[in-house]
Amino acid sequence: LYTVRPGDTLLGISADYLIRTDYWPRLQALNGVADPTRLPPGMKLRVPIPWLKRLPAKARILSAQGQVNAVIAATGQTVAVHSGLSLQTGDRLLTGPDGAASLEFRDGSRVLLQADSELRMDALSAYGPTRFADTRIRLQQGRVESQITSRSGAGPRYEISTPAASSAVRGTRYRIGMDPAAATARTEVLEGTVAFEGHRTTRTVEQGFGSLAETGQAPLPPLPLLPPPKLTERPPVVARWPVQLGFFP
């Protein structure tokens, strides 16, 4: 929904925000506007997301610990990662054996990159001045856990690809890992649904299931995830350090 400002016309709005200026008659028909040159300020115009211009977007580092570096595509420089650092299309994020980093995308989706991982920002873009965004990232190795902002309808897309398979979602929480030595990608879905695609085959992985794909092979049929481990009984208040936690197998 676009809120009309004083002096706005459908032609001007189309030139500023839409992929084609000559979309203004479509905008007029969609909203039942009588005069495209006289729009009352405060009027709400419905604008289909696919009509909006695609603009570059950024990812923002929320936190980093241990060894975390970024390779900036524009300069080729490797920099130490800190909270607040922005990444753009083409930039790479690398974590060491003790490293981890969390980052947030334009639409509020978040990713936790775990140790010994490499993540590339393949394509980050936004639909006009909105929070709707296309986020396409590539996990070369390691593991990430994603918490994706719910989305519906045409347009916005969130996709993680690996050398073995790719995953596309519209609102979910899931993990994906890539083991280059074994040429294998794995995904585990905690909430929602993931389309796990490899070798021209797509598997729909539902909540509580996981799948595996080897490079050059179709993903295997999803299997139920193992139940989460349960902590053994522990006191509500811990007064000594270090803390020991026991797990059932």
Image: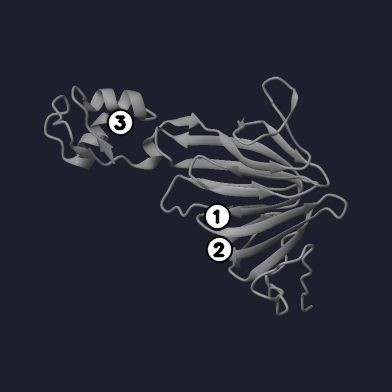
Number of other residues with Cα within 10 Å of mark 1, as a class: few under 14, some 14 to 19, many 20 or more: many
| Distance Cα–Cα, label 2 vs label 1 | 7 Å
Q: Nearer the N terminus, badge 3 or badge 2?
A: 3
Which quarter of the figure has residue 140? top right
Q: Secondary structure at mark 2?
A: strand
Residue 231 lies left or right of residue 20; in this view the side is right
- Residue depicted at 13% across the width and 31% down the height: 40
**CB atoms at circles 2 and 1 under 8 Å apart?**
yes
Note whether 245 is above or below 71 in the view shown.
below
Residue 79 lies left or right of residue 237; in this view the side is right
Three-letter code for the amino acid on which mark 3 is drawn: Tyr
| Distance Cα–Cα, label 3 vs label 1 | 29 Å
Three-letter code for the amino acid on which mark 1 is drawn: Val
Give the x, y percent position of residue 153: 41, 52
Residue identified by numbered label 2: 193
Q: Nearer the N terminus, badge 3 or badge 1?
A: 3
Note whether 144 is above or below 34 in the view shown.
below
Q: Nearer the viewer, residue 226 or 34?
A: 226
- Residue depicted at 73% across the width and 66% down the height: 220
Which quarter of the figure has residue 224? bottom right
Residue identified by numbered label 1: 169
Residue identified by numbered label 3: 23
